[in-house]
Amino acid sequence: MMNATDYKRLIVTLVVAILALSVFTWNRMWKYSENQMETRATWNFIAENEIARKHFDQIGTADMVEYLEIFDNMKGRATNFKNYDLSLIWEKERTRMIQDVINNLRKKTGDDLGEAPDAWIKKYGYGSTNVTHKATVSN
């Protein structure tokens, strides 16, 4: 027969086990949600790039160089992903987009400044590697 102390020990043991199981379950769900967010971000990145590629012919040279500048400044952006495979996919897509923009610039300008984005940005960009360009307003 169990006395009151044994019941208290049993209850404390059960509460600790329930808490440990709850923390474990919450942790697993958080990791799953984190992975889902990273997967969604990678998928959106690829989908948005495909949409942009379809409109390359309609985009001017200055805007293409701005695309190039933006993608060049994204280096290492996916390194905070916990899923290493997704960060590799992100980086591969970023590199692919840079190459597609450079190939399109070659077609539009007739120049071949190489594979490095810096040369294209320097020649056709706004003279700055800053992505935010202030518009001038005339009164």
Image (cartoon, grey):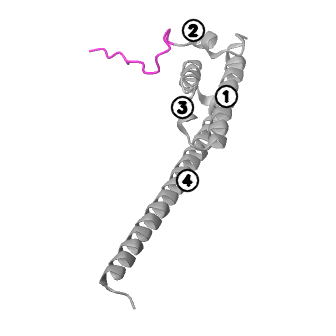
Going by the numbered disc 4, the residue's amino acid type is Gln
- The residue singled out by tag 1 in the image is 95
Residue 121, picture quadrant: top right
Mark number displayed over residue 36: 4
Residue kind at label 2, given as amino acid type: Lys
Between the C-alphas of marks 3 and 4, the distance is 17 Å
Instruction: Say whether marks 3 and 1 touch (CB < 8 Å).
Output: no
Looking at the image, tell me whether mark 2 or mark 1 is earlier in sequence order: 1
Alpha carbons under labels 1 and 4: distance apart: 23 Å
Q: CA distance from mark 3 to mark 2?
A: 23 Å
> In the figure, 9 relative to 132: above or below?
below
Q: CA distance from mark 3 to mark 1?
A: 12 Å
Identify the residue at image location x=46%, y=17%: 130
- Quarter-of-image position of residue 9: bottom left
**Corner quadrant of residue 71:** top right
* Cβ atoms at labels 2 and 1 below 8 Å apart: no
CB contact under 8 Å: marks 3 and 4: no
Residue type at the position of mark 3: Arg
User: Is residue 101 in sight in this rendering?
Assistant: yes
Q: Secondary structure at mark 1?
A: helix
Tell me if 27 is positioned left or right of 51 in this view: left
Residue marked by disc 2: 122
The boundaries of the magenta stretch are 126-139
- Look at discs 2 and 4 and give the one toward the viewer: 4
- The answer to which of marks 1 and 4 sits earlier in the sequence is 4
The circle drawn on residue 77 is 3
Mark 1 crowd level (few <14, some 14–19, many ≥20, 10 Å Cα):
some
